[in-house]
Image (spheres, helix red, strand yellow):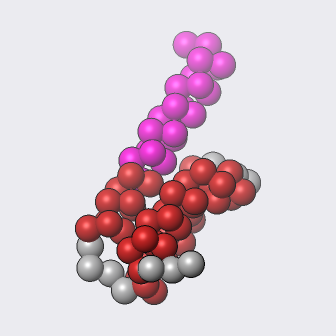
Amino acid sequence: MKPDKEALLAEELRLRKLRRLVDFTAALLCQADLTLGQAQKLIADTKARALELFPDKGDTFDLICGSRLRRILAEKYRLQ
């Protein structure tokens, strides 16, 4: 395989892992009986794992995935 193709496949694999992680976190937030503190820790842990997969992309996580997870928190815990 060419190095470019290998790098692309590796990035696609990391993206799939991140998507599954965020989807799983969102499902837990919606369905599990968590305190607000536990839910916030879950989001922080998810972001930490995302940064392991994509270093220096914390702002991107906050913009895309973080907003989805914060919206779930706001709805479930009636935050403003």
Residue toward you, 31 or 75: 75
Considering the image in quadrants, where does the N terminus appear? Answer: top right
Residue that appears at 43% across and 71% down: 75
Residue toward you, 14 or 41: 41
68 over 38 or under it: above or below? above
Q: Decide if residue 52 is in sight here.
A: no
70 over 65 or under it: above or below? below
Where is residue 48? Give x, y as percent: 57, 65
Residue 7 is left or right of residue 20, and the answer is right
Where is residue 73? Give x, y as percent: 46, 72
Residue that appears at 59% across and 25% down: 8
Residue toward you, 73 or 17: 73
Number of marks in picture:
0
Residue that appears at 59% across and 17% down: 5
Q: Quadrant of residue 28?
A: bottom left
Residue that appears at 45% across and 39% down: 16
**Residue lying furthest top in this view?**
1
Dominant secondary-structure state across the stretch colored magenta: helix
Where is residue 69? Give x, y as percent: 49, 63
Q: Quadrant of residue 17?
A: top left
Q: Quadrant of residue 25?
A: bottom left
Where is residue 50? Give x, y as percent: 56, 56
Q: Which residues are magenta?
A: 1-21
Considering the image in quadrants, where does the C terminus appear? Answer: bottom right
Q: Decide if residue 68 is in sight here.
A: yes
- Please say whether residue 38 is one of the residues in the magenta stretch: no
